[in-house]
Amino acid sequence: MTSLSEKTVDVAEPVSKSWFVYLVRAANGSLYCGISDDPVRRFAKHQSGKGARFFLSSPAMALVYTELCRDKSDALRQERLIKKLRKSAKECLVASYQSD
């Protein structure tokens, strides 16, 4: 007689989506901060004139900063922190990102 053994079931852990906080430079030099699970796709939306009213007055020119976050709530938290920064501090983020 064979003994019963415990069956192991592979339970896949839910794959969490990667979220990013990003900065986009507008034609007038200003920086727009947002979050997305695909910043390159989101930037393309901004360039097409969709996705944010911010770019109605000055078109999106370049995706200049992205930062990987643990999850969406972390990305939202980081976005709030970045939005509180002075423009000079945001420019430092951009400069450090471009030098990496």
Image (tube, helix red, strand yellow):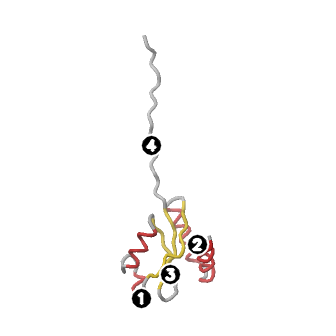
Q: Are marks 1 and 2 in contact (CB under 8 Å)?
A: no
Residue 69 numbered mark, or none: none
How far apart, in angstroms, are the residues tagged by discs 2 and 3? 18 Å
For discs 3 and 4, the disc positioned in front in the rendered view: 3
Whole-number angstrom distance, CA of label 4 to CA of label 1:
46 Å
User: Which residue is denoted by mark 3 in the rendering?
Assistant: 25
Q: Is residue 89 left or right of residue 16?
A: right
Residue located beneath label 2 in the image: 81
Q: Which corner quadrant holds the C terminus?
A: bottom right
Determine whether the residue tagged by mark 1 lies in a helix, strand or loop. loop
> Sequence-wise, which precedes: disc 4 or disc 1?
4
Secondary-structure class at tag 2: helix
Residue 89 rendering spot, x and y as whole percentages: 63, 79
Pick the residue in front: 65 or 69.
65
Query: Local crowd at mark 4 within 10 Å, few (<14), some, or many (≥20)?
Result: few
- The amino acid marked with disc number 2 is Leu
Which badge, 1 or 2, comes first in the chain's sequence?
1
Number of numbered discs on residues? 4
User: x%, y% of residue 56?
Assistant: 39, 85
Alpha-carbon span between mark 4 and mark 2 = 34 Å
Type of the residue with mark 3: Arg
Say which of 13 and 94 sits in front: 94
Q: 10 Å neighbourhood of mark 2: few (<14), some, or many (≥20)?
A: few
Assign a secondary structure to mark 3: strand
Numbered tag placed on residue 12 in the rendering = 4
Q: Nearer the viewer, mark 1 or mark 2?
A: 1
First of labels 4, 2 by sequence position: 4
Horizontal and vertical percent position of residue 94: 58, 76
Of pointers 2 and 3, the one earlier in the residue sequence: 3
